[in-house]
Amino acid sequence: MRKLIKRYKFAILLVLIELIIVAIYPSVGKKSLDITWSSTLEMLAVLPPIFILLGLLDVWIERETMIKLMGEKSGFKGIALAFFLGSAAAGPLYAAFPVAGVLLKKGSKFSNVLIFVGAWSTTKIPLLLFEATAMGWEFMALRFLIDIPGIALIAYLTEKLLNEKDKQYIYDNALA
Amino acid sequence: MTEGGTSLFTIILYIIAMGLLFFSFLKNKQKTKMALEKAWKSFENILPQFLSILIIIGIMLALLNPEMISGLVGRQSGWSGIVIASVIGSITLIPGFVAFPLAAALLKSGAGLMQLAVFISTLMMVGVVTIPVEIKYFGKKVAILRNGLAFVFSYIVAIVMGVALK
């Protein structure tokens, strides 16, 4: 119980803040509760398949297979697969990180995992369709075209700026 | 298109996940049980951070309304508008099906294209609120580097789009 409270203490603190806002500014407070509630429903609707796929990936895909597909020597194929997996996703960016953790654990190259996260954040297919209807095809297509090299570049630079120790720490963390 | 676009993909994702789960169950019950346990453990492991994010989203979006954003990122707002748009985009976390109609409405009410491009780009790529989750998996250095580079990159996106779509 104590451990549970410790883990959730920040969330509990935030709930208290939200309730204080409700008490002092009822209209803003009520709006914030409504938004939190609808975001929660949205999260609960989209997360189960993501975590089930994460579990299946962890149990069924051998480390050797993943290294071949997205590991150090996977080359262009690994990059393309990372882009595809990220773009085919649904759900908020914060759900990408647990999946990224499993990809790391299975031996994916770090820059490929970053490409996966980058694609998840910005070139998700459902979002692109949505963007096109809201902002026009031209806007969507141009942003998409700039984003592809941008995501790759961010992934490449981030990996370059890490030393071996940083990377080892991340991989060890994923295995723990 | 309304929310349907996003939820259609969610449905497809459900069908894929359930199909694979069923297939996994036929092949090996024990492994399937392990996979589900793993799924739950991973979810529970990150749940405190997820809950915090949900509450922060609620408070933030209740305070920031579209009129306010519109006033800050108008066509005449220039570089200061771009900077403000990028900061709002970085710290807020708005789901796509809310963000794009909002951006479209802002465009109609006179927001600048570059301001909107940097807003959308930072909104999607930079996540200040979700940094604790990112740190948990990637460590501090990567989280800061990735978000920092994505922030800078969003300005490049805005400039290219501003020039190309004039």
Image (tube, coloured by chain):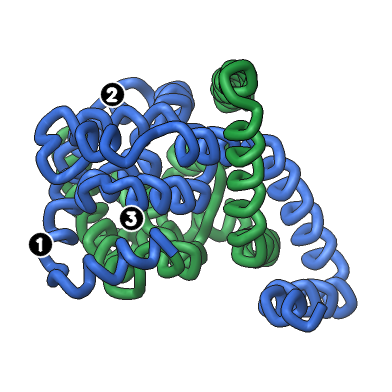
Chain colours: A blue, B green
Mark toward the viewer: 2 or 3: 2
User: How many circles with numbers are drawn on the protein?
Assistant: 3
SS class of the residue under badge 2? helix
Q: Nearer the viewer, residue B38 or B17?
A: B38
Q: Residue at x 49, y 38 (%)?
A: A59
Q: Position of residue A67 (x, y in %)?
A: 23, 40
Q: Residue at x 44, y 22 (%)?
A: A129
**Location of residue B87 (image quadrant):** bottom left
Look at the image and tell me whether residue B147 can be seen.
yes
**Location of residue A120 (image quadrant):** top left
Identify residue type, mark 3: Gln
Residue marked by disc 3:
B76
Q: Which quarter of the figure is the N terminus of chain A placed in?
A: bottom right
Q: Position of residue B24 (x, y in %)?
A: 57, 22
Mark toward the viewer: 3 or 1: 1
**Would you say B87 lies left or right of A141 here?**
right
SS class of the residue under badge 1? helix
Look at the image and tell me whether residue B166 can be seen.
no
Residue marked by disc 2:
A138
Residue marked by disc 1:
A160
